[in-house]
Structure formats: C-alpha cells, structure tokens
Image (cartoon, rainbow, N blue to C red):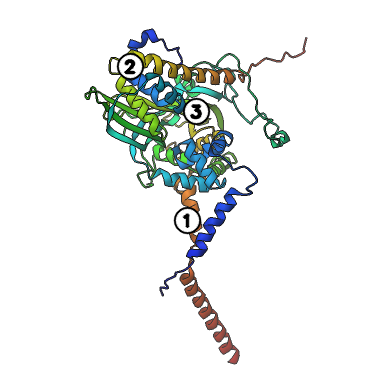
Amino acid sequence: MDEQFDPDQSANVSRAEWMGVLARASTTSLAELIKSLGELPEFNWLRQPEVGAVMTRGRAGGTGQVFSVGEMSVTRCAVTLTSSPDIVGHAYVQGRDIEKAKSAAICDALLQTNRREEVLRSIIAPLKDEESARHLKARRKAGATKVDFFTMVRAES
Amino acid sequence: MYVATKGGESAIEATHELIAEERRGDTTVPELGTDQVRNQLGRAVDRVMTEGSLYDPDLASLAIKQAQGDMVEAIFLLRAFRTTLPRFGAAEPLDTSKMIIRRRISAAFKDIPGGQILGPTYDYTHRLLDFDLVKEGANATSAPEATATEQTMPRVTDILGAEGLMQAENREEIEAEPFDLGRQPMSFPANRDQRLQNLFRGDEGFVLALGYATQRGYGRNHPFVGEIRMGFVEVEFTPPELGFTISIGEIEVTECQMINQFTGTKDIQPMFTRGYGLAFGQSERKTMAMALVDRALKASELGEDRDHPPQDEEFVLAHSDNVEAAGFVSHLKLPHYVDFQSELSLLRGLREDALSTQDKEAAE
C-alpha cells in the first residue's frame, strides 16, 4: 500500500485504485491539486451529492463470523461530462464533504477520457505520495517505541 | 383522571438560554473550537464515535462541545443524528491483518513477528498531574522517529491458530447478513454477531465493570492479552452501480484478542478459547473489557455453567446501551403528577383504614 507511486506505470492503475486514493485524500489537498487542471470541464449531475452512511463490518476474532460494527459518514455523487455524456464519474468519499465528492467524481470522469495521464500525474500521484508519507511517518514514530528486549545476565559463576 | 398541563414555555426557553450561556462560560476565555476538541480531546472523540455508532470525528467533536463534555449526552446526540443519514449499504468486513500499526503488544508472547510496539500509551506514565500543561503554548513537541515498523504484522491469534491450539473462529460457507441493531430490535437468544455489535456500542463503564467482575470470579475465565493492535484500516465498499469494490476511506480502530483457558470435553481436545474486542479510535480499555465479556457470553456454547451476570446475555445485552439506559432513568423526571396523586390518596386511605381499625380495637 505504501509503494511509491510510479507515474510511468500509470497505465496499470485501476479505477478502483484511483477511486480509493480520491476517497481517502484530504479535502484541502484535493482542492489544491485540482486547481492544476485549470478550468474544470462542464458536467451534469447524474446523482446530486448526498451525505449518508455505510455500515462498517468486522469479523469475530479478526477472521470469523461477520458482525456489524458501526456506521461511517460518506458522501456520494455522480457526474457526466457535457463533452462526452457516456462517461460517468462516480465518487464515494469518507465524511460529509460535498466539495470533495464533486472533485472526486470529476476526476473519476476525466480519468476515463484522454486526460487520464494528466490527472494521474497531477492529482492521483501526489495524493498517493502524500498518503504514503503520512503512513510512513506514523510507522517511523511507532518504530521509535518498539521494545528492544535484552536479557539480564545473572552473576553466578 | 386526565389533567391537561400547559405552561412552562417561557421557562423552557429560558433554560435553553441558560445552558447556552453556561456552555460558553466566561466570555473573557476564548471559545473552544470543535477542531480543538478533535485534535486535543481525541480519546473523548473516540468514545463518542464508538458508543454513538458513527465514525465521524467532526460530528463527535461537535457533540462533545454541545454537551459540555457530558459523554452520555454527546453519544445520544450522535446517535440521534445518525438516524437522519440514509444508509448507502454495508462495507466489506475490515481486514485488521492489513492494519497500518501504531501500537501492537502481546502479553502472552515476548517475541512476536514485527515486535512489541508501545505506540502512544499512558501505561508507562507516572499518573502525576503535569503542571506544565497549565502553561499554554509551551507544549508543542515532536516525537522521535526510527526505523519504520513493518508494513503489516501477523495477528498473534492467527499464529496460535495455525498450530491448532486455539479455538477456530467459525466462518459460514455462505455468509448470512449479520444482525444490525441499527435496523433490528434486540432478540434472544442472541448470536455472536448481535452480541459483538451490542458490546461495541455498549457503555464503556458498564462493559468494563462486567469484565472486571469476570476477573474477580463472577464468570472466571483466566485471560491473557494475546494481542492488542491499534492503527489505520481501510474501509472497502461495493457500490451496486459500480459492481466492483473500492476503498471509501480509512478509519482508526483498536482490536483486542484475549486468550482464555478451556479444559476441553470428552469430544473436544483441550485448547485455548478466545474473546474479541473492537472499537473505533484508540479505545484500548474498552476493547479489553469487551473481549472479556465476549468470552463470558460464550459460556453456554462451551457447555460452561451460567451462574453469573456477565454470562447472562439478556442481562448484559439489555442493559449495556447508555442511550437506552439514560433515557429510561431520565423518564422518571417527566411529570407523574396524576400517578403520584393516585398513589398518595391510596396511601392516605390505607393509613386511615388502619387507624380506624386500631380505634375500633381500642374501644372494644
């Protein structure tokens, strides 16, 4: 999950992967990065932004019977591009964040057009790098609290 | 007798204004921001999200501010809000083996693959009040960094399970939809899925007390902390209109796996049994208590005696929810004027009857 994103491999990025990156992105980062695309394409709402909840589930013991855990807030929406109405951009993003959902749906739509390379390079790659850096920092701070056991040698001779 | 009661509107309006004023407090002190609650009172936020049954740190922070830090009230506010959200569906089960780990310890094994990671914990603090925290603006610190922990670490219980020493967590071939207290009323006998969801939302104090009781002999079950892990996990969801699974976010959770003794029966080889705890955020105490009670509630499945309250699922599940409990206790504050009048006149009548009988007896 934390591999460096390689833009040269971008052709291999699946839709599920970029949708996940957009969903987990911080609102401010996505809002900042999307400016680099210049004027956004014209679009129509296929589904207006809607705030709702998804029930998270767990497994007993981590591996066993499925149980309902608790809900999490999610915002979803869907757009079509005026230039190519067959393309539908979807977004399901964590939190109650209509702006972020809109940006994510537009990105998802553009990623299905000939602007894919551009969006991968200027939005998905930096977001993924930011997430990797955040995870690495957490793991490095956790690493500093790793216990080094040493055995006391008893003084018997 | 039915007595229509009107009035009190202006009193109620004034009490709303009074709590608003009290909430804000001394206006020469800066107002508390919900971002401050989220960032600096994180454990309160975690508890409100867990027992409020909604992962949304911003809303939980707002609830805590609005309730002036009254946790049960904040949980109630979040639960009430939750009911206004349309349900988009249910996520794939969380895979805690893929957790980005911030803390991970085992009290059963010293040397575990990935190591013992203390993470942020109060365990090794001296529990002395730190008066430096009174001074504002002097508390920004940066924790040290070292070699990163491994990207994923195996769950300790899975290692034991591979040796066959651990009771397996059974998984149905075709998995039924799990019970959901958000949409179904409680029912008995309860299966493990209903019990776990109930304990997840259950009041931390109540679940902790029951877990403590099991340790003190009321449903004794010899626990070891197999593993506690805390960190970030992805939430995956399959929107029907897409037909494939996507990640829709990342949440922080704590998981506790207790290892318990079990002597075995003539049909079953002796093996360890287990209790499971899970909570949103950093909620270690809650997950430990939940794991103890989860194990105690397995009593009948394991053919153990059910002599104590923590083993009695009706007792545990019906009383664990602090929103329900607070509601039923609070209803005693509602006007019961008529009920009470009838009891009062009944009591007066009884006493008069008793007195006149005494008088009669004295006269005879």
Chain containing mark 2? A
Which amino acid, mark 3?
Answer: Phe
Q: Residue furthest bottom?
A: B363
Task: Identify the residue at image location x=54%, y=36%.
Answer: B35
SS class of the residue under badge 2? loop
| Residue B206 appears in view | no
Distance between the Cα atoms at labels 3 and 1? 40 Å
Q: Nearer the viewer, mark 3 or mark 2?
A: 2
Q: Residue type at mark 1: give it.
A: Phe
Residues packed near mark 1 inside 10 Å, few (<14), some (14 to 19) or many (20 plus)? few
Residue B77 screen position, x and y as percent: 47, 47
Whichever of labels 3 and 1 marks the residue nearer the N terminus, that label is 3
Circle 3 is placed at which residue position? B272
Is label 3 or label 1 in front? 1
Q: Are marks 3 and 1 in contact (CB under 8 Å)?
A: no
Quadrant where the C terminus of chain B lies?
A: bottom right
Chain of the residue under label 1: B
| Towards the viewer: A7 or B256 | A7
Asked if both marks, 3 and 1, belong to the same chain, the answer given is yes
At 64% across and 31% down in the image, what residue appears? B122
Residue highlighted by disc 1: B328
The residue tagged with tag 1: helix, strand or loop? Answer: helix
- Residue under numbered circle 2: A14
Q: Position of residue A132 (x, y in %)?
A: 48, 17
Q: Residue B123 appears at what percent x and percent y? A: 64, 30
Q: Which mark is residue B76?
A: none
